[in-house]
Image (tube, rainbow, N blue to C red):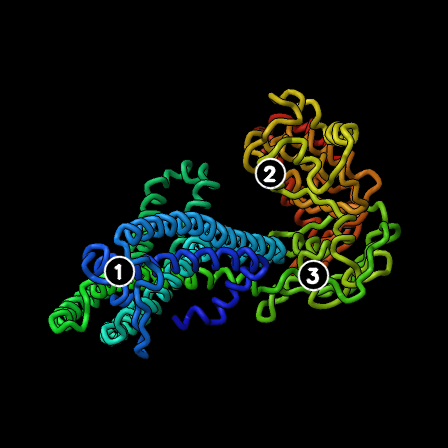
Amino acid sequence: MTSLLSPQWRRLLSYVRPYSLRLAVGVVLVAFTALADGIVALMLRPGFDYVLNPSVSGSTLPLVTFPNGYTIYLNRFFPPSIHHVWTIFALTVLFLYVAKGIAEYLGVTQIQYVGQAAVTRLRNQVYAKIIRQPIGFFQSNPTGRLLSTTINDVERTRIALSEYLADLFQKGFTLIVFLAVIVVLNWKMALGSAILVPLVVVPVGKLGKKIRRSSENSQNRLGDLSQILQETVSGNRVVKAFGMEDFEIAKFRNTAQRLLRENMRWVRAAVATGPMMDLLGALVIPLLILYARDQIKHGLMTPGIFIAFLFAMFNAYMPLKRIGQVYQQFQLAQGASTQVFGYLDREEEHSEQPGAKSLEPFSQEIVFENVGFAYDADSTQVLEQIYFRARRGEVIALVGSSGAGKTTLVNLLPRFYEPTSGAIRIDDLNIREVTIKSLREQIAMVTQENILFHDTVWNNICYGLTNVSRGKVTGAAQAALAHDFIMELPQGYDTLIGERGTRLSGGQRQRIAIARAILKDSPILILDEATSELDAESEMFVQKALANLMVGRTTFVIAHRLSTIRRADKILVLEDGQIRESGTHTELIARGGTYARLHDLQFADDDMLAPAQAAPAKLNVTSNSL
């Protein structure tokens, strides 16, 4: 049982402390139930020796004989009349069992509440810790594994801290009381029965360590299973399009089989506890019968003492066996909690410096001063010596091949990542010196794959805002050219749009996201490939909505389609993490450098695809909005 006192278990039990009063009440009530059982066991002696044998005098029949020889006789508590003895005996047993039942119900529910509430706190902390991790954390940790830890691992801990914690107290007190009873009834038989206990306790302890290791491996396999499920459900169209159903089913089946093998390792170890305890009983009971037979024959023990002793011993044996099972479950919970505490011990997203200021509303310019960035100390630089200025109201376009660092650059502005060198300033104030909340309040984003939640249209538009008037919400939707199609939905703004907005088209999802950004009304706007996956007609609506959104805002635009950024105030051409060129569209074309080359290549491709375009004129008109 030493592992119950390990730092990990002390940490788990720390979540119980806020509910100490409830736990104390539950423990007292559970202790009473054990005490009641012990009193019933002691009453078996006079029940067998006096009630069933009325010729014996109550003044000469011992009720309890202590190890030091002190004896309490029956007539101290019962009158000599057999009828009185039987009546009191029956009423006492009835009262004890009624009181025991009430106390057991109240006590176990109190302890169960403590365990449930403690694990609820733990689960809330794990979720909060995960949500507050930096962006890079989610790129390196599979979603399925995070789901498995937050739900499955914590659930196994919940079972231990609620159901088995109540069991531990209940069976623990029962064991203590009945051990005391058998010592009082006959300390010699009690000592003889205990000699063989270490033969079981030591192997059970070793099995517990094996269970803990197997539990950790089992939770990892369960995480793998969750990851496969998450990927194939969210990517079901790709699975079906490539005819990979059988492949994915086989992969899931193989992973499930590995989970089965791992689970059976700890199941075999856990189940072995019961037979080992039964073996202990099989060795002890025949020896006790032989000893008691000799003692009764020579008048040194009454049948009542032996019956009461056997009753108490069996009642001590059952909680001892159960405690062994509880111990195994605690080992499982300890193995499952390894990953849980691993997440809790992670550092959260970079916190503010001491004395961080609230960023005043943006009014002048944003400056990137020789900014460099690498994802970690061992990786190569993603960005190097990035320097440029963006004045209020300007549109800054970022151009370059995939992997040039465009998205990483704009992710530095809301501090999704921290620059490894240089500084980013807003109105001459280093963004490291301001609170993250005040910084992000001034930035709105519309990305290539905007995330909508399984909620109503209204709540998706108002995400992050409270107490917004209906006029403002509908105004934002109208500006985003979304109001008309929203009103055509079955419940209008109250329509549930499905997970990730799957009940809407791509263009509709983008316009909902644009309405969200318009309603936020932030002075700085980031557009990351906001129209790259849309057809020509959807792009027309989205481009118009973006034009409404960009009015009066400092905007950073990432776009592969160079036609959409011709009107940008400044175009930055990134290559190998550095700004190779900077200027307007006309200036960069005249320069004949990287931008001109990309422009020629792209429009050469467009000319080749021109016959297949459904509405090129419509697209050209809307592209000038940026």
Give the Cα separation between the discs numbered 2 and 3: 36 Å
Q: Nearer the viewer, residue 77 or 526?
A: 77
Nearest to the observer: residue 159 or residue 180: 180
Q: Residues within 10 Å of mark 1 (few under 14, many from 20)?
A: many
The mark found on residue 578 in the picture is 3
* Between discs 2 and 3, the one toward the N terminus: 2
N-term mark: 2 or 1: 1
Please determine whether, in this image, residue 163 is positioned above or below residue 484.
Answer: below
The residue at the point 56 percent across, 60 percent down is 20
Q: Tell me the CA gap for discs 3 and 1.
A: 94 Å
Residue topped by disc 1: 46
The residue that mark 2 highlights is: 453
Tell me if I can see residue 153 in this picture: yes
Residue reaching furthest to the right:
364
Residue type beneath disc 1: Pro
Query: Which of the two residues, 337 or 317, is positioned nearer the viewer here?
Result: 317
Against 91, is 133 above or below?
Answer: below
List x then y, in percent, for residue 200: 26, 71
Residue type at mark 3: give it: Gln
467 w.r.t. 252: above or below:
above
Task: Indicate left or right for 580 with 245 as reference.
Answer: right
Name the mark nearer the viewer: 3 or 1. 1
- Residue at the image position 70 percent from the left and 64 percent from the top: 419
